[in-house]
Amino acid sequence: MTYAYFKGQFVPVDQAKISIQNNTFQYGTGVFEGIRAYWNSQVRQLYVFRLREHFARMLRNCRVLTLKIDKDEKELCEITVELLRKNHPETDTYVRPIAYIDSDGLGPKFVGYSTGFAMYTIPLGDYIDSAGIKVAFSSWRRINDNTIPARCKVTGGYVNSALAKTEALEHGYDEAIFLTEKGFISEGSAENIFLVGGGKLITPSRSEDILEGITRETVIELARDELGIETIERPIGRTELYVADEAFLCGTGAQVSPITEVDKRPLGSGRIGPITAKIQALYFDVVKGRQKKYSHWLTAVY
Ligand code: PMP
């Protein structure tokens, strides 16, 4: 039996249902998270990666929308661990919490409604190919902070991602890269982007309508502390990606995905670059619990 957390209880997932009249279903007024738990078969342990940081971000994002989850960060972490223990996966797993408007009220607004919280888990391997992907700039621009804040991981905002990803797939690419309204590089449909140039990492700053990724923070810290590589956060022009030495996407789902081609141009050598390869290997070591130094980022479930 697979359980979900729904309306304050653990229930079989097929009983965790909302009405078709639900306000968030109709208007996309929810805030969600995507969390990974990694199965380490050597020590037979499931490690949730940066659990607290995910709920801290979710609670911050709820504040922007004025959604009010009736649980604090610690309680949300405890519910996650309990749900995983109940489902007891022995494989890499994805955890999806969502805060939503728990009302069938008509009309898009956040006032006058109570906030619901639900969560489910599913097995998840690679979301996109970690061996090298082909990307293209999207004809769709990134939603900007004064329309639907990208930083808030709002359910309705993912129409933007879906349009871009669909266009990319239909044109034979693996992933889309968004530009901002001003024409600077923002991010992928569900990933942050890093370029490598002159031995440094370069990534769009927080003002470039990005989701402030937890993997992005992780990469910046690992590159600095383990490889002595600095990250520059700044606006990045489109053609900087064409001439970058290396580039990769990163995110909870995508993990570290090297970009080997952009708009039909080979990126760098057209193969995984040396710095990207090092960061990718480090990342997998850390999330799988093979780097003791970073065990404070892991929550052991069993
Ligand atoms: N950007 C977008 C639009 C995303 O949906 C995600 C996935 N959550 C990311 C970036 C990466 O964020 P994180 O590393 O926190 O998963």
Image: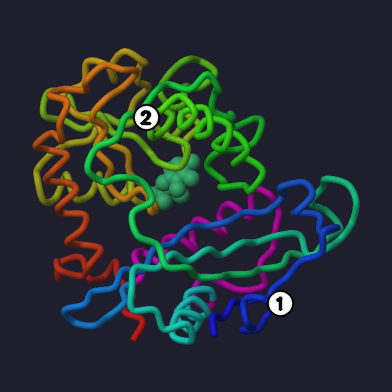
Q: Nearer the viewer, residue 110 or 262?
A: 262
Task: Characterize the local packing of mark 1: few (<14), some (14-19) or many (20 or more) Cα atoms within 10 angstroms.
Answer: few
Residue 121: horizontal and vertical position, in percent? Answer: 50, 70
- Identify the residue shown where x is 17% and y is 39%: 276
Q: Is residue 61 magenta?
A: yes
CA gap, disc 1 and disc 2: 38 Å
Residue 222: horizontal and vertical position, in percent? Answer: 19, 50
Is residue 106 placed above or below 102 in the rendered structure? Answer: above
Q: Nearer the viewer, residue 83 or 293?
A: 83
Q: Inspect this view and state whether residue 212 appears.
A: no
Q: Amino acid at mark 2?
A: Pro
Counting residues from the N terminus, which is met first, the one under dot 1 or under dot 2?
A: 1
Q: Is residue 262 magenta?
A: no
- Identify the residue shown where x is 24% and y is 83%: 44
Question: Magenta region's main secondary structure?
Answer: helix
Residue corresponding to mark 1: 7
Q: Quadrant of the C terminus?
A: bottom left
Q: Can you tell which quarter of the image residue 18 is in?
A: bottom right
Q: Secondary structure at mark 2?
A: loop
Q: Nearer the viewer, residue 22 or 75?
A: 22
- Identify the residue shown where x is 26% and y is 70%: 296
Left or right side of 18 for 257: left
Is residue 16 placed above or below 239 in the rendered structure? Answer: below
- Identify the residue shown where x is 31% and y is 77%: 46
Residue corresponding to mark 2: 204
Residue 69: horizontal and vertical position, in percent? Answer: 66, 67
Q: Nearer the viewer, mark 1 or mark 2?
A: 1
Q: Amino acid at mark 1?
A: Lys
Left or right side of 186 for 302: left
Residue 79: horizontal and vertical position, in percent? Answer: 53, 79
Q: What span is colored magenta in the figure? A: 48-75
